[in-house]
């Protein structure tokens, strides 16, 4: 065995292309499902169970989430992969605690956003989707929200890449915007799959809008627009606080952090990547 | 616990759970939903996981039902048959019916999947998935999360003790508590990330991310009968989805709930098989 | 050296990303078949970094910049006659070691053995098989290999156990077996005996011996000259990231380089070492010529010889007929149970508590500040019952230091860490108190460092400083010697002495009887739920 056989070749682009296709298909599946639901449904949801839309919502969003996972997971370096279980434990623990308080917040994306900031949008999206899938072993009702969770991870990674985590006050702003989009995507799931929201706090807000005569989807979307942006702003701020507390040696271990100078002042010229 | 019966292949129970959930959703009838949920409950008790499953399901379903009842029971602008009215709140038959439909459907879904996750042997599931060429990373994340969770709990308790011993009083108003939560989060997250860094290098050195195809040490039994069942269950689920989406669902039969038509027994059978996943 | 080296490394320089100073520089190390090499170095000397570098865990630029060479000369290697070393220049086109292939020749077991485990194996057997599964070995071969590896490591009886339930020694052996299962010719072990009790250490030593007999080259990284270190063929003394001395153990044992390095030299039968150099050589300028400590202005006053804790001094800490049991069903049956235990510690007194693993030493310590509350009996601090007083308040009087310093540290810099909560107690004087406490443990120069970037020994001392700065009347230490190098032990000694001089009481729990004898006024043994004088 020669010395050179102990080393790795430079990574080639061939396998990457196939994975990119899967990621793209996943994203398209989620987007198409969302558009279909919004275009076809709003009016008649409450006239029957509308289980056709339920199945489309479930199928399309889950398929998208799974394609994303299969596309992204094998491309992640092990140093990112081992963080995902850590992120999931944080998500699930905080999400379960918050769910039991009755407050209209979720806090179930801290781990996802943390990964996204350290390892980028693709890793964030995969973590979000995986989080829903693994959490569904304890609470199956989160499974249908996998696509929304993936979107949160993706947007958080994008925000980090654009430098929104370099200043502490920018992070909650990015979180707010992410929350708006994530809320709009998740609302059809709550409406068509569950016919409402799971928590007492969120339920009260939906009831208020229903009392004013909104359709169920509209009421839930409005509720999401109240809860989600606030929730995500807090989550992004918490994550910013956490990554600032990281020792430099740890933060710079991540190629994404080094390459896009995610955390201001923690950069330096590095070879490769 | 004596192992009286060899466990089913995890894919069989997973296929059963998926088929049951899909067909219940497609059926869209509170009677079917209720039957599936009850069947799952009975089987959970028989499989010996009833005591664990009941509180887990209650924690999810109780607030959800309450929320549905308030939301649709009191405020259902589409409702026509008004039973009672206080100001803006109107109790309507349609609203209550909708709450019942959604409540039972979600209950069936939750029960079936909890029955699956509480009876499946996770190492078997991971082994089967890696044999099916699911990316091994997926199995890793699944298994590692579940082993990590108790370790994180222990660690958090240790951090809390260490910090209290440093004079941090973990009592007081919400702001105090928030500050205390921050002080516990930071060492927890730092330690977890640093541990993960070491583990990454260890996994690499043990060949984890190699492009080579993996083999599996754990042997998970499978039978021809199970393979057939999986195919039938998934085909039935696909047929149910097709019927529902194309608009050819035999609606009336379901509402009466008496007609022994095809998907309903399959749904119940699926749940029955699910429970065999774990020896009673 | 008799045989040709299997692995030869020449490290010109290695530094982590974002850090100017190299962690390692100018190191030559070689491993020959069947030999045991001990790399001795204090905390922060770069041992672990060296181990990871040899194991191929650090290449590829994802951790830091590496300049140097690695040369693997395995039999049957280089079929094409190509056995030139891998050269790293710290540039992007450096070779990237494939850790999966490299580990077939060079195995590495990190200091925290649990880090090597995959966390996905539900049994010991599956954990052992993990590396083989990844390499696509077929099931039959895998089963026989797992059996062989388990046999060699004495794990056969444990094959069906959940790895999370293993003891420290078993876990270490499992990690070593996981590394050795691919039969690497070089095995690098980081602190293989660290924090193991006697039985655990013995089982690990036996495994190392059998590996050596099978021709494996073993490199041990350690900060204590333990039995493995003494059995080594070759010593390298690592200090400040570079090799300051090398040679046969006999020639280096009393060398100035070794004394200076911070390596702990415990009392080993047949060797003339005391627990610390101070115990054999009286503390003075000549015993540590090259470690100037300008930050330590205190004159070296030996402790007064008179038995100071006079019998009539009131006890600062008093446990009266304390009984405690963990709630049933939480796995605590029979472990950590206290039965009508009484203890009185007077001011200025140093008490050591020893006892077998699982006797309840840590449980006892947790009663001092109310982390655990006695089922029956009373705990009094300065004469006042602490029943109902929150731990955070008792902590003003009782400072408790745990084994894992990282759990206690949460600030961004060393200074902020000690300052935390101090201003509430001292107001404007807080900054001065914090600096004084940091100076006392030797961290006066590193006020702006991130606590988690300190070496392990310094992290423990920082945690100690956070306790000292509050000037508690009782200082309780859980296994204070674990993880400390010799410099750290000296600081600990100084801190304990300074505390007793201001009439604080010190209670320490330790499994190192030799250390307890040297440090304490009184030694108590915890056995069967009660204490008795040793």
Image: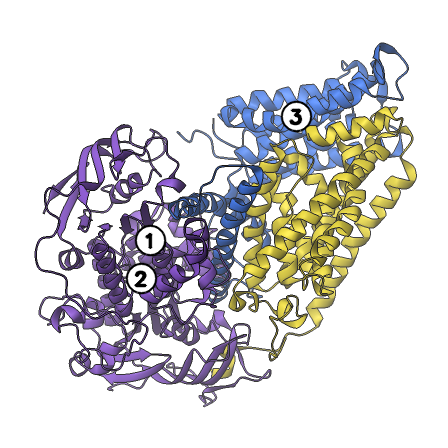
Chain colours: A yellow, B blue, C purple
* Residue B71 drawn at (x, y percent): 77, 23
Q: Position of residue A201 (x, y in %)?
A: 70, 30
Real-space Cα separation, disc 1 to disc 2, in angstroms: 9 Å
Residue C254 is left or right of residue C331, and the answer is left
Q: CA distance from mark 1 to mark 3?
A: 42 Å
On screen, residue C195 above or below C82: above
**Position of C127 relative to C271 (above/below):** above
- Is residue A26 shown left or right of residue B117? right
Residue at the extreme front of the image, as rendered: C428
Please state the horizontal and vertical placement of residue C293, each as a whole percent of the image.
29, 75
The kind of secondary structure element at disc 2 is loop
Instruction: Decide: few, some or many residues near mark 1? Use Cα within 10 Å; few <14, some 14-19, many ≥20.
Output: some
Circles 1, 2 touching at the beta carbon (< 8 Å):
yes
Q: Which residue bears the numbered disc 2?
A: C483
Q: Quadrant of residue A242?
A: bottom right
Number of other residues with Cα within 10 Å of mark 3, as a class: few under 14, some 14 to 19, many 20 or more: many
Q: Are marks 3 and 2 on the same chain?
A: no
Q: Which residue is mark 3?
A: B63
Question: Can you see residue A110?
Answer: yes
Labelled pair 1, 3 in contact (Cβ < 8 Å):
no
On the image, numbered disc 1 is attached to which residue?
C403
Pointer 1 or 2: first along the chain: 1
Taking the image as shown, residue A17 lies to the left or right of residue C439, namely: right
Q: Position of residue B272 (x, y in %)?
A: 60, 25
Q: Is residue B240 above or below residue C533?
A: above
How many callouts does the rendering have?
A: 3
Image position of C284 (left or right of A77)? left
Q: Nearer the viewer, residue C361 or B249?
A: C361
Q: Nearer the viewer, residue C78 or B30?
A: B30
């Amino acid at each position: 065995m020669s010395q050179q056989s102990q080393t790795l070749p430079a990574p080639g682009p061939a396998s990457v292309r196939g994975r990119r296709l899967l990621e793209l298909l996943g994203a398209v599946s989620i987007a198409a499902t969302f558009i279909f639901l919004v275009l076809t449904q709003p009016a008649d949801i409450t006239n029957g169970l509308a289980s056709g839309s339920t199945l489309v919502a479930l199928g399309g969003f889950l398929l998208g989430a799974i394609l994303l996972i299969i596309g992204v997971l094998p491309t992640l370096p092990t140093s990112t992969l081992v963080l995902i279980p850590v992120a999931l434990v944080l998500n699930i623990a905080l999400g379960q605690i918050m769910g039991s308080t009755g407050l209209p917040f979720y806090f179930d994306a801290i781990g996802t956003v943390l990964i996204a900031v350290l390892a980028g949008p693709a890793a964030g999206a995969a973590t979000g989707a995986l989080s829903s899938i693994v959490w569904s072993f304890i609470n199956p009702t989160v499974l249908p929200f996998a696509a929304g969770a993936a979107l949160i991870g993706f947007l958080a990674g994008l925000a980090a890449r654009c430098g929104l985590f370099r200043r502490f006050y920018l992070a909650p702003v990015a979180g707010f915007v992410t929350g708006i989009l994530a809320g709009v995507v998740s609302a059809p799931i709550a409406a068509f799959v569950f016919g409402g929201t799971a928590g007492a706090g969120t339920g009260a807000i939906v009831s208020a809008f229903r009392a004013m005569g909104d359709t169920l989807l509209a009421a839930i979307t409005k509720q999401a627009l109240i809860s989600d942006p606030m929730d995500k702003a807090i989550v992004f701020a918490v994550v910013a606080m956490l990554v600032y507390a990281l020792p430099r040696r740890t933060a710079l271990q991540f190629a994404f952090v080094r390459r896009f100078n995610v955390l201001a002042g923690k950069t330096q010229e590095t070879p490769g990547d | 616990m004596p192992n009286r019966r060899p466990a089913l292949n995890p894919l069989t129970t997973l296929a059963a759970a998926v088929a049951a959930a899909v067909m219940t959703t497609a059926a869209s009838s509170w009677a079917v939903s209720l039957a599936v949920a009850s069947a799952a409950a009975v089987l959970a008790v028989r499989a010996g996981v009833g005591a664990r499953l009941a509180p887990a399901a209650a924690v999810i379903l109780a607030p959800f039902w309450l929320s549905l009842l308030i939301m649709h029971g009191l405020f259902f602008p589409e409702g026509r048959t008004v039973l009672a009215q206080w100001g803006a709140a109107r109790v309507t038959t349609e609203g209550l019916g909708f709450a019942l439909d959604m409540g039972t459907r979600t209950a069936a879904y939750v029960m079936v999947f909890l029955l699956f996750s509480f009876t499946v042997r996770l190492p078997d599931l991971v082994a089967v998935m890696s044999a099916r060429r699911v990316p091994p990373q997926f199995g890793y994340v699944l298994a590692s999360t579940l082993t990590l969770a108790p370790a994180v709990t222990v660690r958090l308790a240790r951090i809390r003790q260490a910090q209290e011993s440093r004079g941090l009083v973990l009592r007081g108003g919400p702001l105090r508590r928030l500050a205390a939560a921050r002080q516990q989060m930071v060492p927890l997250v730092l330690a977890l990330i640093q541990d993960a860094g070491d583990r990454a290098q260890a996994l690499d050195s043990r060949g984890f991310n190699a492009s080579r195809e993996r083999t599996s040490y754990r042997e998970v039994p499978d039978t021809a009968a199970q393979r057939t069942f999986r195919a039938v269950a998934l085909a039935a689920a696909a047929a149910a989805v097709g019927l529902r989406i194309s608009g050819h669902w035999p609606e009336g039969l379901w509402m009466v709930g008496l007609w022994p038509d095809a998907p309903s027994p399959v749904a119940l059978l699926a749940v029955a098989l699910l429970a065999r996943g774990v020896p009673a | 050296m008799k045989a040709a080296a299997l692995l030869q490394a020449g490290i010109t320089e290695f530094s982590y990303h974002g850090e100017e100073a190299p962690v390692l520089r100018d190191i030559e190390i070689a491993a020959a078949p069947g030999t045991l090499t001990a790399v001795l170095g204090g905390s922060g000397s770069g041992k672990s970094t060296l181990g990871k570098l040899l194991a191929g865990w650090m290449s590829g630029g994802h951790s830091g910049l590496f300049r140097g060479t690695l040369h693997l000369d395995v039999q049957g290697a280089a079929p094409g006659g190509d056995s030139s070393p891998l050269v790293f220049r710290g540039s992007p086109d450096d070779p990237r070691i494939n850790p999966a292939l490299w580990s077939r020749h060079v195995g590495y077991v990190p200091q925290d053995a649990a880090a090597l485990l995959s966390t996905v194996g539900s049994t010991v057997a599956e954990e052992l098989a993990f590396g083989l599964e990844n390499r696509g070995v077929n099931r039959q071969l895998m089963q026989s290999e797992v059996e062989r590896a388990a046999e060699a490591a004495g794990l056969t009886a444990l094959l069906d156990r959940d790895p999370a339930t293993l003891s420290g020694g078993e876990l270490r052996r499992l990690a070593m077996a996981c590394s050795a299962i691919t039969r690497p010719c070089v095995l690098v072990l980081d602190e293989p005996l660290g924090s193991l009790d006697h039985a655990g250490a013995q089982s690990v030593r036996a495994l190392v011996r059998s590996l050596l007999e099978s021709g494996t080259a073993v490199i041990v990284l350690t900060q204590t000259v333990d039995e493995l270190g003494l059995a080594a063929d070759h010593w390298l003394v690592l200090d400040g990231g570079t090799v300051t001395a090398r040679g046969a153990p006999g020639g280096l044992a009393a060398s100035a380089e070794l004394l200076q390095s911070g390596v702990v030299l415990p009392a080993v039968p047949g060797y003339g070492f005391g627990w610390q150099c101070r115990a054999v050589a009286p503390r003075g300028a000549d015993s540590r010529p090259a470690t100037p400590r300008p930050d330590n202005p205190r004159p070296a006053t030996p402790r007064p010889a008179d038995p100071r804790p006079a019998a009539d001094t009131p006890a600062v800490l008093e446990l009266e007929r304390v009984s405690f049991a963990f709630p049933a069903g939480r796995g605590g049956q029979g472990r950590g149970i206290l039965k009508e235990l009484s203890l009185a510690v007077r001011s200025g007194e140093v008490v050591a508590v020893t006892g077998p693993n699982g006797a309840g030493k840590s449980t006892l310590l947790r009663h001092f500040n109310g982390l655990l509350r006695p089922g029956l009996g009373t705990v009094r601090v300065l004469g006042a019952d602490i029943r109902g007083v929150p731990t955070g308040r008792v902590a003003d009087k009782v400072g408790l230091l745990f084994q894992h310093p990282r759990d206690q540290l949460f600030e961004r810099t060393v200074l902020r860490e000690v300052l935390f909560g101090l201003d509430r107690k001292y107001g404007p004087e807080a900054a001065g108190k914090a600096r004084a406490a940091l100076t006392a443990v030797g961290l006066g120069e590193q006020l702006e460092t991130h606590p988690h970037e300190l070496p392990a020994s310094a992290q423990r001392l920082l945690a100690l400083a956070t306790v000292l700065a509050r000037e508690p009347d009782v200082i309780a230490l859980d296994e204070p010697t674990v993880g400390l190098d010799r410099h750290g032990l000296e600081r600990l000694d100084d801190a304990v002495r300074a505390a007793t001089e201001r009439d604080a009481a010190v209670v320490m729990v330790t499994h190192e009887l030799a250390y307890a004898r040297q440090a304490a006024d009184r030694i108590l043994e915890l056995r069967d739920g009660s204490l008795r004088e040793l």
